[in-house]
Structure formats: structure tokens, C-alpha cells
Image (tube, coloured by chain):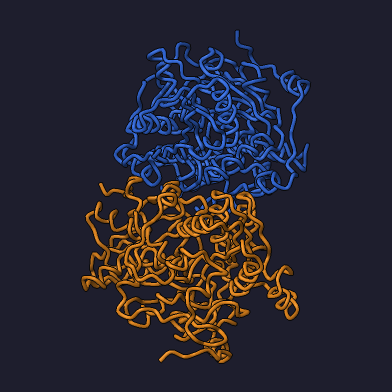
Chain colours: A orange, B blue
């Protein structure tokens, strides 16, 4: 009888994070100062991040030790289970073997605590008393609130207004863990006020919320800022996901031909993908790593590779990224965690070098995939995760057409318990599709005067 | 370093349920026909339940085999983890060792699928095409919807109006798994219409919703009814929880002095408690098994032991139970799953015989316990589970006063992801206490003309 899930012992929680930079043929380009356009040194980041995280941001060491204190907290939910998607396989009638890593078992319900915990740990070590951040759908804000609660650090979250209004349970979850949550744009910051002056009814965006959180961190020496994706150290922390999968697939006597993850800023994709991409880089294997992004926010499939700001107002360095332009306001899809204009530097370089793939999926297609998954596997996925499921279904059907028993692995990055209203819209036929035209993308990109990359 | 959690392999999913009836010194009294007041035979239950479940309802076999098909589905989430509550212990500064079994990892988010899956399986085997049920907060309705989806059976849920309006996400979850959900009292049944005629604004109750679901099942030969607690076979299915705990505590090299569970109709309590109570009954051990009920619905601590109806309208047999009277409408506490007037026959007999204990906790006390748990252990508990946590905190403080290193085990029966509005009320100081006076209880009991038990 096929085993349904593969579990590891607590002793199998990884002891090191994997830093793919060490293995990349072309290293990611350096961040630039937004005014001088010169590469910035680590010291420029000191007002925002603790020293240890800045070191991790620039390290080229292949393996970075995970502190014991962090591993102890990881054990609350790690190792997470790897499931064989027997129900989905049967429904698809595919020769493909489909596995999913389920990160929704974490207290916050997604993979985000994998980086929230170490980030808060290093802040605590360096005497920080408060951390600010932004959040879209609320997955990252919840994770940081949870981690701050465990370490006794104040947490201040700027939540994109559209999600603040539409997903009140996420806000309440953060409150339960003791965090303060403000809708963004807010009147607490100059950035927020400037947006509200022009757009009093602004629904907000991740770019705006980042501007606000960064501004608040710059006010006070004991306050730092934390980001839930995009940056190198964040992506690295997530590699615990894929490192566990390697061991679990060994248990299953299997190895992936294809690895899939949803794509917002890159941490989800890096988490499950990089530990397998390592086999391509080290041994010349040919595992296909696919980033599944929303068709309405298609930076990887329709954006350009150039320097751009990480936020809307311009408080961050210029980063080398696939981007739709920092003024691009993504349509209000339910996968709030994927509504970001750019991609992290590492992932952008890998895509540029043809080492990974990207695919874009429409909202309706994603919810269709998510409902089929809920009905065949039981778990109701987060809207972000539905993008990966849509890609998996496509690849599994392809495998059937080719008559090949491919092994497909994907990251079921979170549950959809706070997104039921979106499922209700889908089931009642009220979910709308959001298209983005080429003219809109070109108009957004035309506003950029940031450096191109040869 | 203390291990945080204890995991079992899929091969450790129990192969048999434990039927405590075999070990009880005094067997539960038989159900009576509501009109004749004579003991009813199994055949009287045939319009409502498939034959195999009726057999399980009356069996005195100690071990009942779990079908392979059911075990395969159990493996989606079973074995569930057993956690050591290291964070809570530290906060309490107690010498007690606290463990919790976490049933919130099931797709529906509680222990309820443990019985929903076998119930639907046996219905499917006997050609049933539709199952009706009631649900309070929605945990049971979700579990049954999930199970029906897996077996391709239609599911019709009568959801207590107060919860239907207050917890819309639960309804949407059931819809996602393909179920039809109606607020109860509804105009679909004679029972619902009769209630609405007298009380057009009735918030509903579990007793009323049971009447509606039973009525609908009686209409049609291919339609049966399923109950989420109270009955013997339901309690027995839940023993997989405690049977796994026995193995997990062996791993930990520990054994409980005290076992605690929330109490609604008895399935939660039976699930974790009976496999340990077995050691008391078989070997004369002295494990304390504590049922934690809401102070506003105190059937175990302030009810009487007599025959009473399982529902409000009178469509069920008379069952021997600790009861507040079947017309008792419990206050609208957030722990909707515990808002039931009576207790199952087995648990009632065990309490009558002094073999188990009961304690009652106020709503505010329970949410206070739940928030402390969320802040120290990470997981946000269901309001039902908070009753167990309140009891555990009390017992752990007692252990500290006595300077005794007692081992306490409890069932964290579900997560609170659909109950965040209740937490928000608590955190903002708006959660109200519900008292029930002795006069109210006596008035409800005075309406009963059902047989007393000597």
C-alpha cells in the first residue's frame, strides 16, 4: 500500500541553512544606493537589520549554521510532513508521482515562520526591542507576530489596507500574539500621509507598506525592520523546507524530476527549490524548478531584468530584479502574498541564466486547482499555494500525455483557513479574473529611470 | 534537551478501536422508546444508521477492528503529534510535565474526522447516497462534509443559526467540500417550522438541529443520519486519540497522572480518556480523568442523571444521561461544540460510578487560558479546547503548591482559526460572561417527565 506521508524525527531538523550563492555560476549583482547608484556596503543596512543578518545577506559560505535556540523553536512544527498526493493522482489518472511538502502545520499556518524565528532571534541577541514590518494577506505578519511573542519583542505590522479590511481574522491572529497592526497607507508615517494626500481611498500595496515599516524603523535605534521575502538571508532561511524534502524523498525511494512553488518575492520558491537546484549546479542533474506566479502580477514571465526599488516610496536600495516597476499596483487577487512588483536578486539571476523556469496562472484556474485539491487531498490550500497546484496539474497532465512516470514535488506553503471568503466567491461564480495588458506593463516600466543591466 | 514532540509512523495508526463497555463494572443502561418507554432493539435505529454502526453501538466486544479503507484515510493526518508543553510549563513555573495531543492537524481542524470517516465508510458500504447531520460551531459539520466528499456521498448540514451567522467561514469550508448547509431552525422541516412559528428569531440549538437532521433522514430510504458525539460508536471511534498517546508517552518514558479533555457530549473526552481509564479498570491504576465543561452548560457538575431525549423536538430515543433537560438552551458561548444539554450514556454511567471527574470553567477563564497557551506554545486553540487548558493550568498550579512532578495529558482537540472573532472580543474586553442560575436549571429540569434512574 502506498505510504501517505513521510515524517522525520526532531533530530532531522536541519542544522545548517543552504546558501545557493556559493554554487551560482553568476553571483547576484550588488544592491545600489538609490541616490549615488554606487554599490552599497553592508554598513548601509545597519539601521534596518541586526549585524548577523547583514552578514548572512552577503555571505558566500555554502552552509550557515542554524542556532540551537532557533532549532528548538523550529521543533514546534518542524520537520513538516511530506505527503504523497494519492487522491490527486487518482483524480488526474496520471502516471506521475506527486508529492507535497505541507508547511501549513506551523502555528501561523505557512512557511513564513521559518525565517521569522531566526530574524527575531538575531534581533533579540543584539538588543533590539521592537520590529516593524509590512504584510499583504497577513501570512508574514502573523509569522513575525508569533516569533516576536516568543522572544518578548514588540511587533508593529503595516497591513495592506485591502487585506486589513478583507481578512480581519488575520489581524486578530496577530493581536492574539500581541502585535500592533495598522492598515497601510496609515497616517503614522510621512510615506503613508503622502500616499493618502494623493489617494485618500488607496487600497495600499506591499510596496507602500514596506515604505511605512522601513520609515518607522529608521526613527528609533532600538527598532529594526524585518522583510518576509526577496532578500538573500530570507531565502536562505527557507531552505530548511527543501533540505527536509531531500531526506523524505530518500525515505520514499524517489527523487524529483520537477519541483514547483508559488512565486511572490522568492522565499517560497527558494525554500523548496534551492536544495534541489543544488544537484543541478553541483552534479549537472536536470531537475526542472518551476516558479508559479499570478498572471496578473507577472514579473518573471513578462517583467524586465533591471535595477529597481524594493518599495514604492524609495526608502530601499536599488536591487537587481525582474520587475514590473515599483509603481505597478497589482490587481486585488486573493493571493495577497504574491502581489509584489519584483523578484529577489538571487532568483532573478537564476532566471536570467536559464537555470529555473517561470509559468503564470490565472486566478480562476488557481481556485479551480485549489478546490480539486481540497476535494481529493482534504487540505484547503492558501490562494498562494493554488498557483503551485495549478502548475502541478498541468505538468501531471503533460506526463500523462507523454506516458512518463515523472516525479513532481511542490510546496503546499500554507492552508486557506483565513481565505474561505475567496473560496465562497469562487464556488458561487463571483470570482473575477484580473487581466493585465501589455500596455499597462509598458506604462509602468516606462516610469523607471533606474539602471538597466547589460 | 527536552523533546518537543513525539511522532509515530503510519504503521502505528491503531488497527482496532477500544470499546470501554467491555471493561465497565456497570454497563450503560439501554435506550428507551420515547412513547412506550420500553428498551428499544437495534432494529429501531435502522432507519437512521447503517447496520454496522448499530452493531457497534451495542457491541460488548473490547476491541473492534478498523477497516483498512478507514485506516488509509486516517493516514492523511494520523498519527497526530503529541507535544510536550515546554513553553506553558515554563510560564507556569510548575514541576508538572504537561503533554498535549494535537488533533487540529486534521483537514477539518479537529478530532471530529476520526468518527466522520468510519461513519461515512459504513454508510457507503450499505448503499446510502446522502447523510444529514447537525452542527453547532461547525467542527462536526466540516468533518462530515470532508468525509462525504472523499466517499462521494451527498451531505446536508443543519447548522445552528447563531453559528451560521457568526462563523461564516465554517459554512464556506463545508461548501468547499461540496456539502449543502442550512441555518437551523429552517423551513425545510416540520420541526424547524414548528420552532419558527413560536420563535421566528430563534438562534437555534444543537437539540433543534438534531431534530431537523433526523427528520430529513427519515424521509428517504437512501438517506441516513450521522451524529458527532454522545453515542457509543462515536465515542469508540475517537479512542484512536488515546491509543496513540499511550505509545507516544512510552516514547517519552512517561505515563499520565491526570488526563483532561473538554466536554460537550463525550467524544472528545472518551477519545483521549478511555484508553487510559482502561488501566484503572484493568489494573487498578489511579489515573484521574477530568472532563472540563462550560460553567454555562454544566450538565456533569449541576445536571441530574435520568432518562432524557437527545434532541429538542423528541425524535430520538430516551437515553440515560446527565442532563440539564432537553429544553435547556445553553447561553451563546463561543465554544459552540459544548453547547449540548446532555452527556452520552457511557460517560454518564462512569461519572455516576465515580470513575471519572468533572469540572466547570467560565468563558473568560477559558479564553485567558487559551491566549496564554497561544503565546507560550504558538498554537491558537479552539474555544472548546480552552476548557481543557483552563483545567490543566489549575492542576499544574496545584502540582506546584504540592511540590509534585505530576504528569498531565490533555486533548488539544482543534485549532481556533475560525474563532478569531471570539479572541478579538476577549482581547478588546468585550467578551461577556454567561452565568446560569440554579433556578434556571431547576426550571428546565422541572419540565421533564422522563424516567428517573434509581
The part of the image, by quadrant, that contains residue B387 is top right
Residue A438 image position (x, y, % from top left): 52, 88
Residue A51 image position (x, y, % from top left): 49, 65
Identity of the residue drawn at 48% across and 11% down: B26
The part of the image, by quadrant, that contains residue A237 is bottom left
Q: Nearer the viewer, residue A259 or B71?
A: A259
Residue B328 image position (x, y, % from top left): 70, 28
The part of the image, by quadrant, that contains residue A357 is bottom left
Answer above or below: position of A62 versus A146.
Answer: below
Identity of the residue drawn at 42% across and 68% down: A390
Answer above or below: position of B286 versus B214.
Answer: above
Left or right of B433? Residue A274 is left
Residue B167 image position (x, y, % from top left): 64, 49
Identity of the residue drawn at 41% across and 16% down: B23
Answer above or below: position of A418 versus A214.
Answer: above
Q: Is residue A217 visible?
A: yes
Q: Is residue B148 visible?
A: no
Left or right of A369? Residue A441 is right
Quadrant placement of the C terminus of chain A: bottom left
Q: Nearer the viewer, residue B409 or B240?
A: B409
Amino acid at each position: 500500500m502506498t505510504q501517505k506521508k513521510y515524517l522525520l524525527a526532531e533530530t532531522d531538523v536541519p542544522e545548517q541553512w543552504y546558501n545557493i550563492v556559493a554554487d551560482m555560476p553568476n553571483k547576484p549583482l550588488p544592491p545600489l544606493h538609490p541616490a549615488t547608484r554606487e554599490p552599497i556596503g553592508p554598513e548601509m543596512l545597519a539601521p534596518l537589520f541586526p549585524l548577523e543578518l547583514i552578514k548572512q545577506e552577503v555571505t558566500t559560505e555554502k552552509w550557515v549554521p542554524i542556532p540551537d535556540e532557533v532549532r528548538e523553536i523550529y521543533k514546534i512544527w518542524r520537520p513538516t510532513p511530506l505527503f504523497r498526493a494519492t487522491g490527486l493522482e487518482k483524480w488526474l489518472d496520471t502516471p506521475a508521482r506527486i508529492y507535497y511538502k505541507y508547511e501549513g502545520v506551523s502555528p501561523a499556518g505557512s512557511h513564513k515562520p521559518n525565517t521569522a524565528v531566526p530574524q527575531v532571534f538575531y534581533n533579540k541577541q543584539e538588543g533590539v526591542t521592537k520590529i516593524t514590518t509590512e504584510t499583504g494577506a497577513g501570512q508574514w505578519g502573523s509569522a513575525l507576530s508569533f516569533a516576536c511573542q516568543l522572544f518578548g519583542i514588540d511587533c508593529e505590522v503595516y497591513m495592506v489596507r485591502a487585506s486589513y479590511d478583507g481578512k480581519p481574522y488575520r489581524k486578530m491572529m496577530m493581536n492574539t500574539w500581541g502585535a500592533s497592526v495598522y492598515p497601510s497607507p496609515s497616517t503614522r508615517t510621512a510615506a503613508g500621509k503622502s500616499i493618502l494626500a494623493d489617494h485618500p481611498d488607496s487600497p495600499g500595496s506591499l510596496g507602500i507598506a514596506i515604505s511605512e515599516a522601513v520609515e518607522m524603523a529608521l526613527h528609533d535605534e532600538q527598532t529594526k525592520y524585518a522583510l518576509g521575502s526577496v532578500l538573500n538571508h530570507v531565502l536562505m532561511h527557507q531552505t530548511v523546507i527543501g533540505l527536509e524534502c531531500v531526506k523524505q524523498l530518500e525515505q520514499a525511494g524517489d527523487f524529483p524530476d520537477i519541483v514547483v512553488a508559488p512565486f511572490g518575492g522568492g522565499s517560497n520558491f527558494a525554500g523548496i527549490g534551492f536544495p534541489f537546484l543544488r544537484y543541478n549546479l553541483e552534479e549537472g542533474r536536470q531537475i526542472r524548478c518551476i516558479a508559479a506566479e499570478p498572471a496578473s502580477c507577472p514579473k518573471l514571465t513578462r517583467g524586465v531584468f533591471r535595477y529597481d526599488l524594493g518599495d514604492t516610496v524609495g526608502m530601499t536600495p536599488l536591487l537587481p530584479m525582474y520587475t514590473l516597476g515599483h509603481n505597478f499596483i497589482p490587481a486585488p487577487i486573493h493571493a495577497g502574498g504574491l502581489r509584489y512588483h519584483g523578484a529577489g536578486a538571487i532568483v532573478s539571476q537564476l532566471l536570467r541564466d536559464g537555470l529555473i523556469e517561470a509559468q503564470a496562472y490565472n486566478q480562476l484556474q488557481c481556485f479551480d486547482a485549489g478546490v480539486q485539491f481540497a476535494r481529493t487531498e482534504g487540505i484547503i490550500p492558501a490562494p498562494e499555494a493554488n498557483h503551485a497546484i495549478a502548475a502541478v496539474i498541468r505538468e501531471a497532465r503533460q506526463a500523462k500525455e507523454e506516458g512518463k512516470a515523472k516525479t513532481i514535488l511542490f510546496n503546499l506553503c500554507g492552508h486557506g483557513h483565513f481565505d474561505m471568503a475567496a473560496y465562497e466567491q469562487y464556488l458561487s461564480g463571483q470570482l473575477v479574473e484580473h487581466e493585465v495588458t501589455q500596455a499597462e506593463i509598458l506604462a509602468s516600466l516606462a516610469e523607471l529611470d533606474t539602471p538597466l543591466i547589460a
